[in-house]
Image: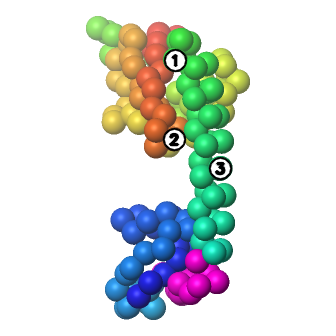
Amino acid sequence: MRVILRADVDDVGHKGDVVEVADGFARNYLLPKGWAMRASAGAEAQAQAMRRSRQIKDAADRGAAEEIATRLVPATITVSARVGTEGRLFGSVGSSEIADAIATQTGIELDRRRLQLSEPIKSAGTHLVPVKLHPEVEFPVTVEVVGG
């Protein structure tokens, strides 16, 4: 069945795309959730408008992400934590603490889920934390964990 996506659907497509999916998938999942509509001649023109608006929004989001990246890459974010012997932390520093430190030190509000921290930081010192604000904009933030 040919449908027009009204929202981004993982492994299927993006908003405004005209895709061919299984009939059952469309009837039982996409259409009831409002994530797609049946493709017709008039609806395809509407899909074209959806794609244009998505591209404009995507370009604006990418520009904003690049501006944030140019401000954060040269900065060093300092996070204080209780440090034990040999530079090991009591506890750990997670993505929410780093996001809070970025907000207080630079004024840039980041969602903690944008920080690609594989596991919490458990030692004092300098660490590079990857940040992914946009599918095409990924950059490292330098985080300095000091005893406090």
- Residue extending farthest to the left is 86
- Residue 139's spot in the image, x, y percent? 45, 26
Of the two numbered discs 3 and 2 on the same chain, state the one appearing first in sequence: 3
Residue in front for this viewpoint, 136 or 99: 136
The answer to whether any part of residue 95 appears in the image is: no
Q: Secondary structure at mark 1?
A: loop
Residue at the location (66% across, 58% down)? 53
Residue at the location (66% across, 66% down)? 49
- Residue 67's spot in the image, x, y percent? 63, 26
The number of numbered discs placed on residues in the rendered structure image is 3
- Residue 110's spot in the image, x, y percent? 60, 35
Residue 147 against residue 7 in the figure, above or below: above
Residue in front for this viewpoint, 122 or 13: 13
Q: CA distance from mark 1 to mark 2?
A: 15 Å
Name the residue carrying label 2. Answer: 134
Badge nearest the viewer, 3 or 2: 3
Residue at the location (57% across, 29% down)? 66
Q: Identity of the amino acid at label 1?
A: Val
Of the two numbered discs 1 and 3 on the same chain, state the one appearing first in sequence: 3
Badge nearest the viewer, 1 or 3: 3
State the mark number for residue 138. Answer: none
Mark 1 Cα-neighbour bin, 10 Å: few <14, some 14–19, many ≥20: few
Q: Identity of the amino acid at label 3?
A: Ile
Which range of residues does the magenta coloring cover? 30-44
Of the two numbered discs 1 and 2 on the same chain, state the one appearing first in sequence: 1
Name the residue carrying label 1. Answer: 73
Name the residue carrying label 3. Answer: 56
